[in-house]
Amino acid sequence: PRRVLRLYYRYLATGQVAFSKNREVNVNKTYEWAIKTLYFSAKRFSLRATYDMMLVQKCTDSSGKLVENIPSWSSFRNYFYSRNYHKQPRKLIARSGLTNYQRNERPVFGSSSDWRSVPGSYQMDATQADIYLVSRQDRSKVIGRPYIYLAVDTATQLIADIYVGLECDESAVVLCLANAAQDKVKFCRECGVEIQSLPPFRPDGKGLVEKSFDLIQQRYKPLLRRKGVIEPDAQERWSTDYRSQSVLNLDEFTQIVIHCVLYINSGRILSDAVTQAQKWLDSDASLLDVPYEELYLMSLPRETAKLTRKGLRINGLLYVPMDMDGLTLDKTYNAAFSRSDLSCVYVLLDDCSFKPCWLSPNQSQYSGLSQPEASALKQHERKQRSTARRQEVAASVESIQSIRQIVRDASAVGSEKPKQDGKVINENRSGERGLLT
């Protein structure tokens, strides 16, 4: 009864039945050192390996033998789990890196679509397509895998910009942005921008565009199997050489990607029973009206060249203007060019306007080709010229040898000829004609 009364009076006075006792946390310095130095490291020791390493470094004498009364494995393991070291973010960061933690382990709240509620903000990224392509110039030549750049509107999930090519640099990024300002109907018929850079290797920061890549490749890969598509077993022993199966060129693959994007934008239904294109059209969008041509020309890389009587030599190719208005011979100009189409360059004039210059007629074989394709064609032409020169030299040597042999044969059967005047030669000539008839 007295214990009950004491607890009752304590409750009336303090509102608590019992007081918690402040117990001292028993810290094992050796265990702490092993966990924080060995386990929380990029070497990724297992817990058992960490225990073994602790014994080697902390529980051995000068001769390397274990001392008596070493800590047990169960004691070390219980110490680790009782203090929740296995649940600490520090473990994931120390063993797998900060990038992996931020991408795969960090708390994620909300939706990526809530980042912007008004159309006009794009998530951009690039990927290398899982397919091998052939050259547009010669289908027997494999040119490797193309790159796909996408820009996906954050508010509506609409794929607003695409670029398919062989380049993977800043020019491809700007060309993708320029495509956002282009008339999409014209683009399909033919085949104040703010940029926020996100950390590399962080697909979680732009999940919409990453999923769009996945949707596009899921769309075309089943239809293009045995046509150059790379399967998951590409790195395994005795796997198929998918390069030998390639049949599509860059233009044909671009058309396929466009059809996939059209389906994703206008045919695929979202969770709210509308398409991405309809969501874009129904939104209250306040977008900037950017001239496509101006944005495209400003985005192209530049090269300096002197205008000579033969034209402008840029990237080893000659370009000639349609007229000389605003141009002066022997003057150096800045010229913008596209690495994806070498048919034309644009000379920057003094009034900040651009003047197109087209490929010289004697180099028309490079028209419509990209820079990598033109380089491959040049290399092929060099090999052809080298082979032709070797054949020419061989033919010349063979001709000389034949001529010399004929002379040797004629000299062997020849005889001494007396001195003959013109009358005798004419008589001989008449007689020879009679033999020929």
Image: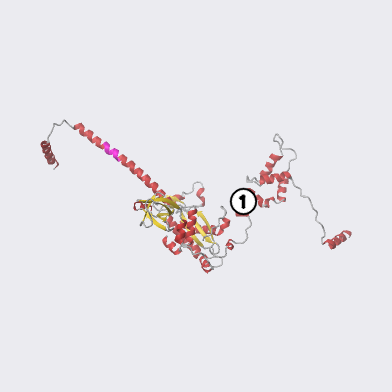
Residue 154 at x, y percent in the picture: 55, 62
Specify the principal SS of the magenta part.
helix
Q: Give the secondary structure at mark 1.
A: helix
- Give the residue at mark 1: 98
Residue 23 at x, y percent in the picture: 79, 51
Q: Is residue 400 left or right of residue 335?
A: left
Relative to the observer, which residue lies in front, 294 or 276? 294
Residue 42 at x, y percent in the picture: 63, 46
Q: Residue at x 67, y 52 (%)?
A: 88
Q: Is residue 282 visible?
A: yes
What is the number of callouts on the image? 1
Please, what is the three-letter code of the amino acid marked with disc 1? Leu
Say if 257 sits above or below 243 in the image: below
Q: Residue at x 13, y 41 (%)?
A: 433
Q: Quadrant of residue 64?
A: top right
Q: Is residue 213 left or right of residue 72?
A: left
Q: How is the image coloured?
A: secondary structure
Give the magenta range.
395-401
Q: Quadrant of the N terminus?
A: bottom right
